Structures are given as C-alpha cells and as structure tokens.
C-alpha cells in the first residue's frame, strides 16, 4: 500500500488519471459449496497487498475467533460478510469487491455455492466478463459445477478459468488435474458458448499458483491466476455493437430545453447521427450530447447522457433510441430461456411484470416448451418451473417492446420477471427471437364498437366474479342472481366452473398450474363477453389472488366486481353435497382446494357475502341491490 500512498500524496491528479485509463475486468467466482471461492478471493487480495492494516488486524482477530484454519489466517472471512455466512461457513449473498493492480482494475463477485442460492449466482454472473469456476480436486465435477457452467454459458460469458483447487489435498497430482480438465472441456463443448477455457491447478489456502508459481507443481507451465486476470483479452463488445439507448426519463428543466436521458447500452453516438425511436419507428438526428460537464463530441457504451434531437418527437420512458441504419427489433411475443428464482413455482398463464432496460410491461408465460437438465443437457417435458430450474418458454406481453436477441446484445436482450403481488424478482431470462405470430397476427379493426353493443342492450357491461371454497354456495347464488337479472330484462351469461370444464377446459386437471390456466382462459372469455355488452357472471373457486388480479386487469377495473362468497372451511365441508371433501380427506382427490391446495381469500372484494348469516336468496337480493347502486341495472 506504501507505493500507492506515496503516489497519491505527490500527484493525486496523475494517480486518478492512471486509474481512469486502466481497463476494467468484471469476473465472478462460482462452483459448488466448500470449493474455496471466498478463500481464493481473500488470498488474492492478501497476496496482492490490497487490504489495509485495520482489515488485516480484523482478519487476524476473526480467524482466531471463528476461523476454520487453526492458527492460520482464514481468508474466506475477508469476503463472507454476512453473520449467517460466517456461522455456517458458506456464502449466501453475492459479495462484490473492487481492487486494482498496476495493470488492471477488477470487480469480483463471490457467488454462492449452495443450490438454493443459484439465483444469487446468476445475478452476479449477469454483468461478468469472465468466470472462475472452482472445482475441489478431491471431488471433481459436481452438479453445481455443471449448473453454474450452464448458466455462465447461457449468460454469454465466453472466458472461463477452470480453477482446480485444493491440489495440496491430492498431493499436487498432475493426473488428478489432467482428468478433471479433460472431463470439464468435454462438458463445456456440449454446452457451447464458452469460447476460452484456461485451466489452472491451485491451492487457495496455501497460495499455490495464485500470485506466484507453485514450486510443488513444476509440471504446470501455464499462467498463474493473477497473471491471467491481468492479461486476458476481453473485447469491449458493447461499443462495437449498434447504438442503443433505452430512455430513462425526459429531461425538461425549462421551456427551451427537451432532452432524453439514459444509459448507453451499446454502440457509440455523435451529433449528426441519424437515429430511430422504437417502438414508434420515428426518425430524427442527434443535435447535442449533453452532460453535467458540458457537451460531448461522442458518447460510448457505459456512459449516461442526455440527447437532444433536431425534430420534435414524442418519446417517453421505456422507448429506445437506436441507430437508424441498424435498429432493434420490436415484438410482443418471444421464445426465451428462463431461470426461475422463486420458491413458488412458475405457473403458465399467471401474470407477471417483465422489466427490460427501462421498460416494464405485463407478461404471461405459456407452458414451458421443455426444462433443461443441467447434468445431461436433456430437454425434459415440464408443466412448470421450480426454484433454480431452467426452461425454454414462450412469453407474451401486453404491448410490443424494442429488443435484440440476447446472443447479440446482453443489455437489450435480457429481462427479469417480477411478481405483481409482492414486487419481488422471481425469474430472469434471455430473449432468443420474436415469434412469427408476433408480427403476422394483427388486431382487426371492427366497425361496431363495444359501447354500441352495450347501448342497444341498455346496460353497462360488467363481470361479476364469484369466488369461494367448494361448497360455499357461490354457484347457487350466481344462478339466482342470473335469474333475477333476466327478470329485470338484463342481458347476461353465466360461466360456471364445472360446466366450463366439460368443454373449453376439459383438457385441464386440478394441479396448481392447471388451475392457473383454467382461470386465464375463463378471464379471456369473460372479456369477450363484456365486449358483446353482456353482464357476465363467473362462478369459479379461482383460489389464487394473482389469477383474479389477471382477470381484473384484463376486463378493466371499472367493469370487474369481485364477489367473495365467504364460507368457513368447516361449514363448506359439512355441506359437501358432492362428497368431494370426503374423498379429498381420504386421499382419493389430490390438489383439492382447502385440503391440500391453498385458497387465497380476497383482501378487498367489492361485495362480500357471508353464507352463514343469510340465505342464498337474500344474498342474491343484496348483490342486485349493489348492482343497482352502481348503475349496472335499473331498479
């Protein structure tokens, strides 16, 4: 640290300029648990003299108190920052560390080894240029090695360091190292995508081949780890690609200035360059490149700038400014690879939010085409994706977005999926290509509008969505409401869960995934019926809030009334007119709502009916009264 301190003290501007001009390498360490990832980074920082005296003192104290190496320093403690990680001796979160040498700057992400934290590993890998995949020389290639390598290959990381660690525990055997290298290269060839593999035998604990060449492995003639990290050629692919800048916000500080601010994902831009704005496809020319430090003659990938244009164009957050001669594609349906990152499975048909760049849109995933087995790379049939599973799925959005295939541009071809109820990230994915129907199937304009269809019926179209447990009485009440509406000359249609399963949904079972698809289809039908001007009554258990939210969003909040037929489980089970609860309790019916499949009660239903307090007839009268108050029907 002394050399740096002297330079900073004597010429701080020169030091900062030298730092700016160094290239930056982002890399991750990954592999199975206990392969030595944190120890490797700790050793790398220690041997490079890149930790301060107070950090070293803390490391010495922590090593004595909670270390695993006896009297030696436990380098993993430099990186394992969470208390639970130190207690368990594993890495849970992604730990980022910045350091630099005389030749290069580095950002390293120490990623988790446990299978349950694969999502954290994928997060760390999403911005990396190189991956260090550690393998315990005693254990060889494990399932997590394969899983992490698969993710690395799919995320577009072309450079891999195969770090065969703990060579000291196999007596520095060349044969052990050679066998592991041969096996891994064969697996990587099957994976595809990994262009360069550098295999290094090492001992992170003893420091062999980390900074200096190991005397115990004279048979190894390749580079040591730090030497390779300092010299590996990582092409700055982002600047070589076509210009892309997702618009983050419209900069309008006064009436005389209107610019469009964002982070340049790829390419370069200069004043005078022709651009195209997507998805509108309007074109213009760049007038200025504005920054806090003044205008630029050129801006490149990795910079945040504000562009002003020669023409007045309607641009908003989520749009993308592209090179006019090489614009991105625009579509609303894609084939994708998805890594599922949530404890709750991914159900086809369930609505999610998809975020890519600065765009956030509603998304629905169709049933996975197949799930990928990371061990055999086989394509297995799947109805859903569980935590840490990878699958190829089609995805549909509620509007078209600009994009590039992920293999062409990591920034504009990647996305995350967000749960609409909890706002938590549940998946990440890569776009392969737009589906043909995305551009070939268009909305057909019709001469007769939905308002016209409703007006000739003299009513306001609405969906009455009855939800409740089996045996709650929702079908009985819905049937009475339907009869009373007809008596008031209303035009209605009743969709009952059992009846629909005889036709439209007869191919669906009762798994959670099939229940989601069941409700998605019914919601689409209900929407079409409101387009026809009908008052549509839907009587389905519809156990999940997310699907009821899908139906509400599809129909429109103003035309959707949720009717919660609130009946306690013990009351519904006591009625059991169909004998279903009895069969479910006996194990003859699987995935029965309320028994071995959950029911998520509405939190803010417009109408709540307690069938333990009033009769079905009285409940129907109350619903008619509510509809009258809302102006749905005349009294």
Image (cartoon, rainbow, N blue to C red):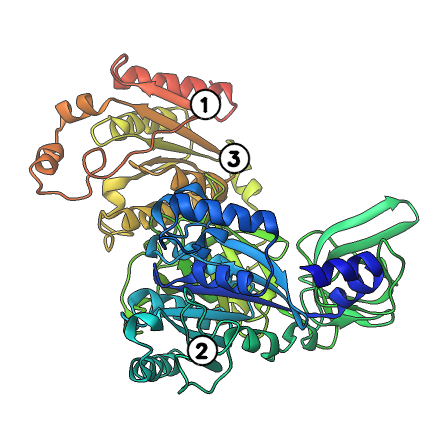
Q: Are marks 2 and 1 in contact (CB under 8 Å)?
A: no
Decide if residue 434 is in sight here.
no
Is the residue 199 above or below the residue 548 in the image?
A: below
> SS at mark 3?
helix
Residue at image point 73% right, 77% down: 325
Quadrant into which the N terminus falls: bottom right
- Quadrant assignment, res 455: top right
In this orientation, which residue lies closer to the viewer: 211 or 178?
211
From the image, tell me which residue sits under label 3. Answer: 557
Q: CA distance from mark 2 to mark 3?
A: 68 Å
> SS at mark 1?
helix
Please rate how many residues cluster around mark 3, counting C-alpha atoms within 10 Å: few if below 14, some from 14 to 19, many from 20.
few
Q: Earlier in the sequence, mark 2 or mark 3?
A: 2
From the image, tell me which residue sits under label 2. Answer: 214
- Quadrant assignment, res 295: bottom right
Question: Which disc is residue 498 wearing?
Answer: none
């Amino acid at each position: 640290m002394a050399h740096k301190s002297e330079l900073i003290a004597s010429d701080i501007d020169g030091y900062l300029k030298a730092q700016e001009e160094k290239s930056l390498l982002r890399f991750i360490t990954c592999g199975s648990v206990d392969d030595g990832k944190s120890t490797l980074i700790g050793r790398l920082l220690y041997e490079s003299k890149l930790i301060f005296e107070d950090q070293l003192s803390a490391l010495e104290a922590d090593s004595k108190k909670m270390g695993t190496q006896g009297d030696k320093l436990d380098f993993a403690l430099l990186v394992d920052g969470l208390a639970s990680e130190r207690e368990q001796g594993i890495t849970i979160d992604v730990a980022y560390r910045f350091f630099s040498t005389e030749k290069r700057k580095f950002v390293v992400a120490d990623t988790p080894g446990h299978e349950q934290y694969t999502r954290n590993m994928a997060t760390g890998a999403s911005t990396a240029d190189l991956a260090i995949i550690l393998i315990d020389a005693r254990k060889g290639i494990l399932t997590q090695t394969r899983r992490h390598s698969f993710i690395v290959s799919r995320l577009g990381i072309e450079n891999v360091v195969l770090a065969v660690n703990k060579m000291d525990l196999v007596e520095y055997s060349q044969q052990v190292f050679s066998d592991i290298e041969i096996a891994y290269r064969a697996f990587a060839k099957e994976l595809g995508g990994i262009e360069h593999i550098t295999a290094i035998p090492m001992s992170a604990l003893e420091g062999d081949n980390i900074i200096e060449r190991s005397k115990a492995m004279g048979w190894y003639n390749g580079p040591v780890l730090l030497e390779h990290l300092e010299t590996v050629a990582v092409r700055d692919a982002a600047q070589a690609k076509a210009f892309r800048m997702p618009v983050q916000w419209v900069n309008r500080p006064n009436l005389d200035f209107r610019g469009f601010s964002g982070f340049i994902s790829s390419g370069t831009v200069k004043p005078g360059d022709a651009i195209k704005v997507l998805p509108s496809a309007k074109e213009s020319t760049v007038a200025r490149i504005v920054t806090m430090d003044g205008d630029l003659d050129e801006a490149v990938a990795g910079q945040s700038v504000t562009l002003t244009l020669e023409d007045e164009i309607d641009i908003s957050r989520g749009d993308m400014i592209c090179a006019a001669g090489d614009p991105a594609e625009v579509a609303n349906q894609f084939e994708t690879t998805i890594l599922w990152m949530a404890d709750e499975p991914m159900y086809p048909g369930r609505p999610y939010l998809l975020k890519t760049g600065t765009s956030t849109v509603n998304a629905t995933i169709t049933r996975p085409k197949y799930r990928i087995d990371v061990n055999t790379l086989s394509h297995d049939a799947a109805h859903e994706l569980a935590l840490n599973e990878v699958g190829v799925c089609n995805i549909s959005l509620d509007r078209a977005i600009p994009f590039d295939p992920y293999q062409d541009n990591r920034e504009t071809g990647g996305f995350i999926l967000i749960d609409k109820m909890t706002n938590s990230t549940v998946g990440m994915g890569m776009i392969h290509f737009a589906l043909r129907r995305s551009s070939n199937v268009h909305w057909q304009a019709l001469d007769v509008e939905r308002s016209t269809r409703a007006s000739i019926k003299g009513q306001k179209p609405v969906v009455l969505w009855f939800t409740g447990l089996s045996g709650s009485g929702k079908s009985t009440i819905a049937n009475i409401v339907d009869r009373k509406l007809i008596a008031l000359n209303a035009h209605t249609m009743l969709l009952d869960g059992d009846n629909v399963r005889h036709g439209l949904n007869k191919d669906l079972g009762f798994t959670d995934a099939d229940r989601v698809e069941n409700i998605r289809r019914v919601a689409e039908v209900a929407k079409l019926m409101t387009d026809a001007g009908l008052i549509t009554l839907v009587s389905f258990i519809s156990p999940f809030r997310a699907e009821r939210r899908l139906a509400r969003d599809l129909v429109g909040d103003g035309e959707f009334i949720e009717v919660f037929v609130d009946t306690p489980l013990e009351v519904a089970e006591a009625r059991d007119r169909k004998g279903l609860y009895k069969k479910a309790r006996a194990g003859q019916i699987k995935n029965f709502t309320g028994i071995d499949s959950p029911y998520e009660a509405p939190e803010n239903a417009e109408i709540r009916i307690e069938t333990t307090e009033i009769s079905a007839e009285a409940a129907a009268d109350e619903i008619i009264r509510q509809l009258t108050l809302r102006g749905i029907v005349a009294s």
